[in-house]
Amino acid sequence: MRRMGLSFIVLINMGILLLSNGWQPGHEKTQPASKPQPAVDADVLDDYIEARMRDLKIPGLALAIVRGDQIEHLRGYGVVDDAGNPVTPQTPFLVASLSKSITALAVMQLVEAGKIDLDAPVQTYLPWFQTADSEASAQITVRHLLNHTSGFSELAGYLRNLDRNVAADALETSVRALSNARLNTAPGEQYEYSNTNYDILGLLIQTVAGMPYETYIEENVYTPLQLQNAYTSLEEARAGGLTSGYVSFFGLTRNYDRLMPYSRTVVPSAGLFASVEDMAHYLLVHLNEGRHPERAAVLSPAGIATLHTPGVVINENVKYAMGWVTFPFPQLATANGANEAVPMAISHGGAWANFRSLIVMVPDLQLGVVVLINKLDQRREEAYDLIVWNTVLLAAGLEPSMVPGSADFLVRYGQLVGVGLIALLAASFIWTVRSLSRRPPHFSRATAPAFALLLALDLAIAGYILFVEMPPTQTTLSLALAFNPEVGVLYLSILIFTLGWGTLRTIWLGINMSQQRQPLKRVS
Protein backbone atom coordinates (compact mmCIF):
# COMPACT_ATOMS: atom_id res chain seq x y z
CA MET A 1 0.00 0.00 0.00
CA ARG A 2 1.40 3.30 -0.96
CA ARG A 3 1.66 6.21 1.44
CA MET A 4 -1.52 8.23 1.09
CA GLY A 5 -0.56 11.79 0.27
CA LEU A 6 -2.72 13.50 -2.33
CA SER A 7 -0.08 15.17 -4.45
CA PHE A 8 -1.94 17.65 -6.61
CA ILE A 9 1.40 18.89 -7.98
CA VAL A 10 3.44 16.02 -9.33
CA LEU A 11 5.04 18.58 -11.64
CA ILE A 12 7.96 18.70 -9.21
CA ASN A 13 8.63 15.02 -9.74
CA MET A 14 8.18 15.45 -13.47
CA GLY A 15 10.74 18.23 -13.45
CA ILE A 16 13.19 15.89 -11.75
CA LEU A 17 12.44 13.22 -14.35
CA LEU A 18 13.05 15.69 -17.16
CA LEU A 19 16.34 16.75 -15.63
CA SER A 20 17.48 13.17 -15.16
CA ASN A 21 17.54 12.50 -18.90
CA GLY A 22 20.71 13.95 -20.27
CA TRP A 23 21.06 17.41 -18.72
CA GLN A 24 22.99 18.78 -15.80
CA PRO A 25 22.66 22.18 -14.13
CA GLY A 26 24.92 24.79 -15.66
CA HIS A 27 25.00 23.21 -19.13
CA GLU A 28 22.20 25.32 -20.56
CA LYS A 29 22.90 28.15 -22.97
CA THR A 30 21.49 31.53 -22.27
CA GLN A 31 20.48 32.71 -25.77
CA PRO A 32 17.81 30.35 -27.08
CA ALA A 33 17.26 30.61 -30.82
CA SER A 34 14.11 28.73 -31.64
CA LYS A 35 13.63 27.35 -35.12
CA PRO A 36 10.33 26.85 -36.96
CA GLN A 37 8.59 23.65 -35.95
CA PRO A 38 6.62 21.48 -38.36
CA ALA A 39 2.99 20.76 -37.58
CA VAL A 40 2.50 17.62 -35.54
CA ASP A 41 1.85 14.44 -37.51
CA ALA A 42 -1.78 13.82 -36.51
CA ASP A 43 -1.72 10.12 -37.36
CA VAL A 44 1.40 9.44 -35.30
CA LEU A 45 0.00 11.45 -32.41
CA ASP A 46 -3.36 9.67 -32.54
CA ASP A 47 -1.66 6.26 -32.58
CA TYR A 48 0.44 7.22 -29.56
CA ILE A 49 -2.51 8.58 -27.56
CA GLU A 50 -4.75 5.62 -28.31
CA ALA A 51 -2.01 3.15 -27.35
CA ARG A 52 -1.44 4.94 -24.03
CA MET A 53 -5.16 5.00 -23.32
CA ARG A 54 -5.40 1.26 -23.87
CA ASP A 55 -2.40 0.57 -21.67
CA LEU A 56 -3.64 2.81 -18.84
CA LYS A 57 -7.33 1.87 -19.26
CA ILE A 58 -8.32 5.52 -19.70
CA PRO A 59 -11.98 5.90 -20.75
CA GLY A 60 -11.74 9.41 -22.21
CA LEU A 61 -9.14 12.05 -23.01
CA ALA A 62 -9.13 15.42 -24.72
CA LEU A 63 -6.02 17.05 -26.16
CA ALA A 64 -5.07 20.40 -27.65
CA ILE A 65 -1.83 21.69 -29.17
CA VAL A 66 -1.33 25.40 -29.72
CA ARG A 67 1.54 26.99 -31.59
CA GLY A 68 2.10 30.72 -31.76
CA ASP A 69 -1.31 32.31 -32.12
CA GLN A 70 -3.13 29.27 -33.52
CA ILE A 71 -4.77 26.10 -32.24
CA GLU A 72 -2.97 23.46 -34.27
CA HIS A 73 -4.55 20.23 -33.08
CA LEU A 74 -7.78 19.65 -31.18
CA ARG A 75 -9.33 16.25 -30.57
CA GLY A 76 -11.31 14.12 -28.15
CA TYR A 77 -10.56 10.42 -27.67
CA GLY A 78 -12.57 7.65 -26.03
CA VAL A 79 -15.85 7.98 -24.19
CA VAL A 80 -17.59 10.38 -21.83
CA ASP A 81 -19.66 7.88 -19.89
CA ASP A 82 -20.74 4.26 -19.48
CA ALA A 83 -23.18 4.71 -22.38
CA GLY A 84 -20.25 5.16 -24.74
CA ASN A 85 -20.88 8.75 -25.80
CA PRO A 86 -17.72 10.13 -27.42
CA VAL A 87 -15.42 12.76 -25.94
CA THR A 88 -15.24 15.88 -28.11
CA PRO A 89 -13.08 19.02 -27.83
CA GLN A 90 -16.16 20.69 -26.34
CA THR A 91 -16.66 18.15 -23.53
CA PRO A 92 -16.21 19.78 -20.10
CA PHE A 93 -13.78 18.24 -17.59
CA LEU A 94 -12.90 19.15 -14.02
CA VAL A 95 -9.52 20.86 -14.44
CA ALA A 96 -8.73 20.61 -10.69
CA SER A 97 -5.56 22.53 -9.77
CA LEU A 98 -5.33 24.18 -13.17
CA SER A 99 -7.89 26.43 -11.48
CA LYS A 100 -5.01 28.03 -9.56
CA SER A 101 -3.59 29.74 -12.63
CA ILE A 102 -7.02 31.18 -13.45
CA THR A 103 -7.33 32.48 -9.89
CA ALA A 104 -3.83 33.98 -10.16
CA LEU A 105 -4.77 35.69 -13.43
CA ALA A 106 -7.86 37.17 -11.76
CA VAL A 107 -5.71 38.50 -8.90
CA MET A 108 -3.35 40.10 -11.42
CA GLN A 109 -6.29 41.73 -13.19
CA LEU A 110 -7.23 43.39 -9.91
CA VAL A 111 -3.60 44.36 -9.33
CA GLU A 112 -3.58 46.12 -12.69
CA ALA A 113 -6.89 47.78 -11.80
CA GLY A 114 -5.21 49.22 -8.70
CA LYS A 115 -7.43 47.28 -6.31
CA ILE A 116 -4.84 44.83 -4.97
CA ASP A 117 -1.18 45.24 -4.00
CA LEU A 118 0.81 42.02 -4.23
CA ASP A 119 2.92 42.92 -1.20
CA ALA A 120 0.07 44.14 0.99
CA PRO A 121 -0.96 41.96 3.95
CA VAL A 122 -4.08 39.89 3.42
CA GLN A 123 -5.60 41.75 6.38
CA THR A 124 -5.61 44.89 4.23
CA TYR A 125 -8.51 43.36 2.31
CA LEU A 126 -9.84 40.89 4.89
CA PRO A 127 -9.36 42.73 8.22
CA TRP A 128 -10.78 39.81 10.20
CA PHE A 129 -8.36 37.28 8.62
CA GLN A 130 -6.63 35.32 11.38
CA THR A 131 -4.74 32.10 12.11
CA ALA A 132 -3.75 30.66 15.48
CA ASP A 133 -0.70 32.96 15.40
CA SER A 134 -2.00 36.54 15.34
CA GLU A 135 1.44 38.03 14.71
CA ALA A 136 2.15 35.75 11.76
CA SER A 137 -1.36 36.34 10.38
CA ALA A 138 -0.62 40.02 9.99
CA GLN A 139 2.52 39.22 7.97
CA ILE A 140 0.93 37.02 5.29
CA THR A 141 0.82 38.93 2.01
CA VAL A 142 -0.98 38.36 -1.28
CA ARG A 143 2.34 37.39 -2.86
CA HIS A 144 2.92 34.76 -0.15
CA LEU A 145 -0.39 33.15 -1.06
CA LEU A 146 0.37 33.17 -4.79
CA ASN A 147 3.80 31.61 -4.22
CA HIS A 148 2.72 29.07 -1.56
CA THR A 149 5.01 30.64 1.03
CA SER A 150 2.37 31.66 3.58
CA GLY A 151 3.13 28.79 5.96
CA PHE A 152 -0.18 26.92 5.54
CA SER A 153 0.31 23.16 5.44
CA GLU A 154 -0.12 20.87 2.45
CA LEU A 155 -2.23 18.39 4.41
CA ALA A 156 -4.58 21.09 5.69
CA GLY A 157 -5.04 22.22 2.10
CA TYR A 158 -6.07 18.73 1.04
CA LEU A 159 -8.43 18.33 3.98
CA ARG A 160 -10.41 21.28 2.62
CA ASN A 161 -11.43 18.98 -0.24
CA LEU A 162 -13.52 16.93 2.19
CA ASP A 163 -15.74 19.91 3.04
CA ARG A 164 -19.06 19.28 1.22
CA ASN A 165 -20.41 22.80 1.86
CA VAL A 166 -22.03 24.23 -1.28
CA ALA A 167 -23.77 27.21 0.37
CA ALA A 168 -23.27 30.72 -0.98
CA ASP A 169 -21.06 31.65 1.98
CA ALA A 170 -19.04 28.41 1.95
CA LEU A 171 -15.79 30.07 0.88
CA GLU A 172 -15.89 32.79 3.53
CA THR A 173 -17.00 30.34 6.23
CA SER A 174 -14.03 28.08 5.48
CA VAL A 175 -11.52 30.95 5.51
CA ARG A 176 -12.90 32.30 8.78
CA ALA A 177 -12.43 28.82 10.24
CA LEU A 178 -8.67 29.21 9.70
CA SER A 179 -8.56 31.23 12.93
CA ASN A 180 -7.54 27.97 14.63
CA ALA A 181 -5.07 26.90 11.94
CA ARG A 182 -1.42 26.56 12.88
CA LEU A 183 1.20 27.57 10.32
CA ASN A 184 4.02 25.15 9.57
CA THR A 185 6.53 27.94 8.94
CA ALA A 186 6.75 31.70 9.26
CA PRO A 187 5.29 33.62 6.29
CA GLY A 188 7.79 33.98 3.45
CA GLU A 189 10.20 31.46 4.94
CA GLN A 190 9.56 28.32 2.91
CA TYR A 191 7.58 26.90 -0.02
CA GLU A 192 4.80 24.47 0.85
CA TYR A 193 2.06 23.74 -1.67
CA SER A 194 -1.37 24.23 -0.11
CA ASN A 195 -4.84 24.65 -1.61
CA THR A 196 -5.60 26.93 1.33
CA ASN A 197 -3.54 29.71 -0.25
CA TYR A 198 -5.60 29.91 -3.41
CA ASP A 199 -8.93 29.57 -1.63
CA ILE A 200 -8.01 32.64 0.43
CA LEU A 201 -7.13 34.39 -2.83
CA GLY A 202 -10.56 33.46 -4.15
CA LEU A 203 -12.22 35.13 -1.18
CA LEU A 204 -9.94 38.14 -1.60
CA ILE A 205 -11.09 38.45 -5.25
CA GLN A 206 -14.70 38.10 -4.13
CA THR A 207 -14.32 40.79 -1.48
CA VAL A 208 -12.39 43.34 -3.53
CA ALA A 209 -14.53 42.88 -6.66
CA GLY A 210 -17.79 43.00 -4.71
CA MET A 211 -19.21 39.88 -6.36
CA PRO A 212 -18.99 36.10 -5.85
CA TYR A 213 -15.72 34.57 -6.98
CA GLU A 214 -17.57 32.46 -9.55
CA THR A 215 -19.27 35.52 -11.03
CA TYR A 216 -15.97 37.38 -11.31
CA ILE A 217 -14.34 34.50 -13.20
CA GLU A 218 -17.30 34.16 -15.55
CA GLU A 219 -17.44 37.90 -16.34
CA ASN A 220 -13.72 38.65 -16.51
CA VAL A 221 -12.15 35.45 -17.87
CA TYR A 222 -14.74 33.16 -19.42
CA THR A 223 -16.85 35.79 -21.20
CA PRO A 224 -14.12 37.95 -22.80
CA LEU A 225 -12.34 34.81 -24.01
CA GLN A 226 -15.67 33.34 -25.23
CA LEU A 227 -15.14 30.07 -23.38
CA GLN A 228 -18.34 28.26 -24.29
CA ASN A 229 -17.98 25.12 -22.18
CA ALA A 230 -16.35 26.47 -19.03
CA TYR A 231 -18.18 26.40 -15.70
CA THR A 232 -17.68 27.42 -12.09
CA SER A 233 -19.87 24.81 -10.37
CA LEU A 234 -20.37 21.07 -10.54
CA GLU A 235 -24.11 21.45 -11.05
CA GLU A 236 -23.70 23.75 -14.07
CA ALA A 237 -20.94 21.60 -15.53
CA ARG A 238 -23.06 18.46 -15.35
CA ALA A 239 -25.94 20.29 -17.00
CA GLY A 240 -23.47 21.33 -19.72
CA GLY A 241 -22.35 17.77 -20.49
CA LEU A 242 -19.52 17.18 -17.99
CA THR A 243 -17.77 13.89 -18.64
CA SER A 244 -18.10 11.18 -16.04
CA GLY A 245 -15.05 10.70 -13.84
CA TYR A 246 -13.48 7.30 -13.20
CA VAL A 247 -11.14 5.70 -10.68
CA SER A 248 -9.02 2.59 -10.69
CA PHE A 249 -10.36 0.15 -8.12
CA PHE A 250 -8.14 -2.91 -7.79
CA GLY A 251 -7.37 -2.84 -11.50
CA LEU A 252 -10.93 -2.16 -12.60
CA THR A 253 -12.04 1.17 -14.06
CA ARG A 254 -15.12 2.32 -12.18
CA ASN A 255 -17.43 5.32 -12.59
CA TYR A 256 -17.06 7.55 -9.53
CA ASP A 257 -19.69 10.22 -10.23
CA ARG A 258 -22.00 9.42 -7.32
CA LEU A 259 -19.17 9.38 -4.78
CA MET A 260 -17.17 12.26 -6.27
CA PRO A 261 -16.19 14.70 -3.51
CA TYR A 262 -16.79 18.35 -4.36
CA SER A 263 -17.05 21.55 -2.38
CA ARG A 264 -17.64 25.21 -3.07
CA THR A 265 -14.90 25.99 -0.57
CA VAL A 266 -12.17 24.86 -3.00
CA VAL A 267 -13.43 26.28 -6.29
CA PRO A 268 -10.58 28.86 -6.51
CA SER A 269 -7.89 26.23 -5.91
CA ALA A 270 -9.29 23.14 -7.59
CA GLY A 271 -12.94 23.42 -8.59
CA LEU A 272 -13.26 24.98 -12.07
CA PHE A 273 -14.45 23.18 -15.21
CA ALA A 274 -13.60 23.65 -18.89
CA SER A 275 -13.32 21.81 -22.18
CA VAL A 276 -9.97 21.25 -23.85
CA GLU A 277 -11.01 23.75 -26.53
CA ASP A 278 -11.57 26.34 -23.80
CA MET A 279 -8.20 25.57 -22.23
CA ALA A 280 -6.53 25.90 -25.64
CA HIS A 281 -7.92 29.44 -25.97
CA TYR A 282 -6.78 30.14 -22.40
CA LEU A 283 -3.31 28.85 -23.30
CA LEU A 284 -3.16 31.22 -26.29
CA VAL A 285 -3.55 34.13 -23.86
CA HIS A 286 -0.50 32.99 -21.90
CA LEU A 287 1.59 32.48 -25.03
CA ASN A 288 0.58 35.86 -26.50
CA GLU A 289 1.28 38.30 -23.68
CA GLY A 290 -2.21 38.33 -22.21
CA ARG A 291 -4.14 38.86 -25.44
CA HIS A 292 -6.14 36.29 -27.34
CA PRO A 293 -5.23 36.70 -31.03
CA GLU A 294 -8.87 36.84 -32.14
CA ARG A 295 -10.88 37.67 -29.03
CA ALA A 296 -9.77 39.92 -26.21
CA ALA A 297 -6.94 40.92 -23.92
CA VAL A 298 -7.47 39.86 -20.32
CA LEU A 299 -4.11 41.00 -18.96
CA SER A 300 -1.16 43.18 -19.97
CA PRO A 301 2.15 41.73 -21.21
CA ALA A 302 3.74 42.84 -17.93
CA GLY A 303 1.01 41.09 -15.95
CA ILE A 304 1.53 37.81 -17.81
CA ALA A 305 5.28 38.11 -17.33
CA THR A 306 4.77 38.57 -13.60
CA LEU A 307 2.60 35.47 -13.41
CA HIS A 308 5.27 33.42 -15.19
CA THR A 309 8.22 34.73 -13.18
CA PRO A 310 9.37 32.30 -10.44
CA GLY A 311 8.86 33.64 -6.96
CA VAL A 312 10.27 30.81 -4.90
CA VAL A 313 12.76 27.97 -5.41
CA ILE A 314 11.37 24.47 -4.82
CA ASN A 315 14.67 22.76 -5.50
CA GLU A 316 17.80 23.55 -7.49
CA ASN A 317 16.02 23.71 -10.84
CA VAL A 318 12.28 23.63 -10.17
CA LYS A 319 10.61 26.89 -9.17
CA TYR A 320 7.10 28.10 -8.46
CA ALA A 321 5.65 31.19 -10.05
CA MET A 322 2.04 32.37 -9.57
CA GLY A 323 -0.08 29.33 -10.34
CA TRP A 324 2.70 27.80 -12.46
CA VAL A 325 5.75 25.58 -12.03
CA THR A 326 8.86 26.37 -14.10
CA PHE A 327 11.85 24.17 -14.94
CA PRO A 328 14.20 23.31 -17.83
CA PHE A 329 13.01 20.83 -20.49
CA PRO A 330 16.31 19.31 -21.67
CA GLN A 331 14.75 16.85 -24.14
CA LEU A 332 13.67 19.83 -26.27
CA ALA A 333 17.17 21.26 -26.64
CA THR A 334 17.62 19.87 -30.16
CA ALA A 335 14.34 21.47 -31.22
CA ASN A 336 15.42 24.88 -29.96
CA GLY A 337 17.85 25.94 -32.66
CA ALA A 338 21.44 25.41 -33.66
CA ASN A 339 22.85 26.30 -30.26
CA GLU A 340 20.69 23.65 -28.60
CA ALA A 341 19.76 25.84 -25.67
CA VAL A 342 17.69 24.12 -23.00
CA PRO A 343 14.23 25.75 -23.07
CA MET A 344 12.17 26.42 -19.98
CA ALA A 345 8.79 24.81 -19.43
CA ILE A 346 5.93 26.55 -17.66
CA SER A 347 3.45 24.01 -16.42
CA HIS A 348 0.89 22.94 -13.87
CA GLY A 349 -1.13 19.82 -13.19
CA GLY A 350 -4.44 19.08 -11.61
CA ALA A 351 -5.56 15.89 -9.89
CA TRP A 352 -8.90 15.03 -8.33
CA ALA A 353 -10.33 11.72 -7.19
CA ASN A 354 -11.47 10.92 -10.74
CA PHE A 355 -9.85 13.47 -13.06
CA ARG A 356 -6.31 14.34 -14.20
CA SER A 357 -5.21 17.40 -16.14
CA LEU A 358 -1.90 18.88 -17.22
CA ILE A 359 -0.89 21.96 -19.18
CA VAL A 360 2.60 22.69 -20.53
CA MET A 361 3.98 25.78 -22.25
CA VAL A 362 7.38 26.16 -23.88
CA PRO A 363 7.65 29.88 -24.68
CA ASP A 364 10.94 29.47 -26.60
CA LEU A 365 9.09 27.30 -29.10
CA GLN A 366 5.79 29.20 -28.81
CA LEU A 367 4.31 25.79 -28.08
CA GLY A 368 1.64 24.69 -25.65
CA VAL A 369 -0.12 21.41 -24.87
CA VAL A 370 -3.08 20.65 -22.63
CA VAL A 371 -4.48 17.22 -21.83
CA LEU A 372 -7.63 16.47 -19.83
CA ILE A 373 -8.34 12.91 -18.65
CA ASN A 374 -11.54 11.59 -17.06
CA LYS A 375 -9.81 9.05 -14.81
CA LEU A 376 -7.12 8.96 -12.15
CA ASP A 377 -5.02 5.98 -11.12
CA GLN A 378 -2.69 7.31 -8.45
CA ARG A 379 -0.38 4.33 -8.75
CA ARG A 380 0.29 5.26 -12.40
CA GLU A 381 0.02 9.02 -12.21
CA GLU A 382 3.48 9.54 -13.65
CA ALA A 383 2.54 7.48 -16.69
CA TYR A 384 -0.54 9.68 -17.15
CA ASP A 385 1.63 12.78 -17.12
CA LEU A 386 4.09 11.35 -19.60
CA ILE A 387 1.30 11.37 -22.17
CA VAL A 388 1.55 15.16 -22.05
CA TRP A 389 5.33 15.39 -22.02
CA ASN A 390 5.65 12.99 -24.95
CA THR A 391 2.98 14.93 -26.83
CA VAL A 392 5.17 18.02 -26.39
CA LEU A 393 8.07 16.08 -27.90
CA LEU A 394 5.91 14.93 -30.83
CA ALA A 395 4.72 18.50 -31.39
CA ALA A 396 8.38 19.58 -31.52
CA GLY A 397 9.16 16.97 -34.18
CA LEU A 398 10.92 14.60 -31.78
CA GLU A 399 10.32 11.01 -30.70
CA PRO A 400 8.08 10.32 -27.65
CA SER A 401 11.04 8.94 -25.73
CA MET A 402 10.14 9.60 -22.11
CA VAL A 403 9.22 6.58 -19.98
CA PRO A 404 8.08 6.34 -16.35
CA GLY A 405 10.69 5.91 -13.67
CA SER A 406 10.91 2.67 -11.74
CA ALA A 407 8.20 2.69 -9.09
CA ASP A 408 9.07 1.40 -5.64
CA PHE A 409 7.91 -2.00 -4.46
CA LEU A 410 4.80 -0.86 -2.60
CA VAL A 411 3.61 1.33 -5.46
CA ARG A 412 3.86 -1.58 -7.87
CA TYR A 413 2.63 -4.36 -5.60
CA GLY A 414 0.79 -2.54 -2.85
CA GLN A 415 -2.57 -4.01 -3.83
CA LEU A 416 -1.23 -7.57 -3.71
CA VAL A 417 0.53 -6.94 -0.41
CA GLY A 418 -2.64 -5.48 1.09
CA VAL A 419 -4.88 -8.28 -0.15
CA GLY A 420 -2.34 -10.87 1.04
CA LEU A 421 -2.24 -9.29 4.47
CA ILE A 422 -6.02 -9.30 4.66
CA ALA A 423 -6.00 -12.98 3.67
CA LEU A 424 -3.58 -13.78 6.49
CA LEU A 425 -5.72 -11.85 8.96
CA ALA A 426 -8.79 -13.70 7.72
CA ALA A 427 -6.97 -17.01 8.21
CA SER A 428 -6.15 -16.03 11.79
CA PHE A 429 -9.81 -15.15 12.26
CA ILE A 430 -10.93 -18.60 11.08
CA TRP A 431 -8.32 -20.40 13.22
CA THR A 432 -9.34 -18.40 16.28
CA VAL A 433 -13.04 -19.07 15.79
CA ARG A 434 -12.41 -22.79 15.45
CA SER A 435 -10.17 -22.85 18.52
CA LEU A 436 -12.63 -20.97 20.72
CA SER A 437 -15.71 -22.77 19.47
CA ARG A 438 -14.56 -26.18 20.69
CA ARG A 439 -16.61 -27.34 23.65
CA PRO A 440 -15.18 -27.54 26.15
CA PRO A 441 -12.48 -25.11 24.99
CA HIS A 442 -9.11 -26.74 25.01
CA PHE A 443 -5.90 -24.77 25.27
CA SER A 444 -2.52 -26.33 24.96
CA ARG A 445 0.51 -24.65 26.42
CA ALA A 446 1.18 -23.12 23.00
CA THR A 447 -2.31 -21.70 22.52
CA ALA A 448 -2.10 -18.69 24.81
CA PRO A 449 1.34 -17.58 23.55
CA ALA A 450 0.09 -18.00 19.98
CA PHE A 451 -2.89 -15.77 20.73
CA ALA A 452 -0.62 -13.24 22.42
CA LEU A 453 1.66 -13.25 19.37
CA LEU A 454 -1.33 -12.67 17.09
CA LEU A 455 -2.47 -9.76 19.24
CA ALA A 456 1.03 -8.23 19.17
CA LEU A 457 1.09 -8.60 15.38
CA ASP A 458 -2.34 -6.99 15.07
CA LEU A 459 -1.30 -4.06 17.22
CA ALA A 460 1.95 -3.63 15.27
CA ILE A 461 0.14 -3.57 11.92
CA ALA A 462 -2.56 -1.22 13.19
CA GLY A 463 0.01 1.04 14.83
CA TYR A 464 2.00 1.28 11.62
CA ILE A 465 -1.08 2.33 9.65
CA LEU A 466 -2.31 4.70 12.36
CA PHE A 467 0.93 6.45 13.22
CA VAL A 468 3.24 5.98 10.22
CA GLU A 469 1.18 5.61 7.05
CA MET A 470 -1.57 8.09 7.74
CA PRO A 471 -1.36 10.27 10.82
CA PRO A 472 -3.69 11.69 11.99
CA THR A 473 -5.78 8.68 11.05
CA GLN A 474 -9.24 10.16 11.22
CA THR A 475 -8.43 12.76 8.59
CA THR A 476 -6.04 11.03 6.23
CA LEU A 477 -8.11 7.85 6.20
CA SER A 478 -11.04 9.99 5.10
CA LEU A 479 -8.88 11.44 2.34
CA ALA A 480 -7.86 7.95 1.24
CA LEU A 481 -11.45 6.72 1.12
CA ALA A 482 -12.61 9.76 -0.87
CA PHE A 483 -9.66 10.29 -3.22
CA ASN A 484 -7.95 6.89 -3.48
CA PRO A 485 -10.70 4.40 -2.61
CA GLU A 486 -8.73 1.20 -3.19
CA VAL A 487 -6.09 2.30 -0.67
CA GLY A 488 -8.77 3.53 1.73
CA VAL A 489 -10.63 0.22 1.55
CA LEU A 490 -7.44 -1.76 2.14
CA TYR A 491 -6.49 0.31 5.17
CA LEU A 492 -10.00 0.23 6.59
CA SER A 493 -10.26 -3.54 6.13
CA ILE A 494 -6.92 -4.12 7.82
CA LEU A 495 -7.84 -1.84 10.72
CA ILE A 496 -11.15 -3.66 11.20
CA PHE A 497 -9.33 -6.99 11.34
CA THR A 498 -6.47 -5.84 13.55
CA LEU A 499 -8.23 -3.54 16.01
CA GLY A 500 -11.82 -4.77 15.86
CA TRP A 501 -11.34 -8.49 15.60
CA GLY A 502 -8.04 -8.48 17.48
CA THR A 503 -9.63 -6.82 20.50
CA LEU A 504 -12.68 -9.08 20.41
CA ARG A 505 -10.49 -12.16 20.08
CA THR A 506 -8.45 -11.18 23.12
CA ILE A 507 -11.55 -10.65 25.24
CA TRP A 508 -13.03 -13.93 24.08
CA LEU A 509 -9.80 -15.77 24.84
CA GLY A 510 -9.61 -14.26 28.31
CA ILE A 511 -13.18 -15.29 29.15
CA ASN A 512 -12.66 -18.85 27.96
CA MET A 513 -9.34 -19.28 29.75
CA SER A 514 -10.88 -17.90 32.92
CA GLN A 515 -13.70 -20.41 32.68
CA GLN A 516 -11.26 -23.22 32.05
CA ARG A 517 -9.34 -22.41 35.22
CA GLN A 518 -12.45 -22.54 37.42
CA PRO A 519 -12.36 -25.61 39.77
CA LEU A 520 -14.84 -28.36 39.03
CA LYS A 521 -17.74 -28.64 41.46
CA ARG A 522 -17.75 -31.83 43.54
CA VAL A 523 -20.64 -34.10 42.57
CA SER A 524 -22.32 -35.62 45.62
Image (tube, helix red, strand yellow):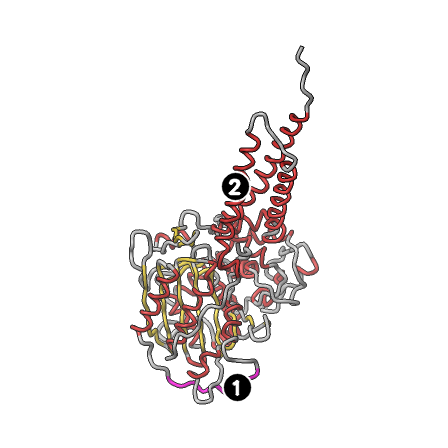
Name above or below for residue 301 compared with residue 456: below
Q: Which mark is residue 30?
A: 1
Which segment did they paint magenta?
Answer: 26-36
Q: Secondary structure at mark 2?
A: helix
Residue 175, horizontal then vertical, whole percent: 58, 54
Residues packed near mark 1 inside 10 Å, few (<14), some (14 to 19) or many (20 plus): few
Q: Which residue is mark 2?
A: 427
Name above or below for residue 360 compared with residue 409: below
**Looking at this rendering, what residue extends furthest in the top direction?**
524
Looking at the image, tell me whether mark 1 or mark 2 is earlier in sequence order. 1
CA gap, disc 1 and disc 2: 64 Å
Q: Is residue 227 left or right of residue 310?
A: left
Residue 487, horizontal then vertical, whole percent: 50, 51
Question: What is the three-letter code of the residue carrying label 2?
Answer: Ala
Q: Residue at x 65, y 58 (%)?
A: 183
Q: Mark yes or no: residue 263 visible.
A: no
Name above or below for residue 39 compared with residue 501: below
Residue 334, horizontal then vertical, whole percent: 43, 84
Q: Quadrant of the C terminus?
A: top right
**Looking at this rendering, what residue extends furthest in the bottom direction?**
338
Name above or below for residue 20 compared with residue 449: below
Q: Mark yes or no: residue 449 visible.
A: yes
Question: What is the three-letter code of the residue carrying label 1?
Answer: Thr
Residue 445, horizontal then vertical, whole percent: 66, 35
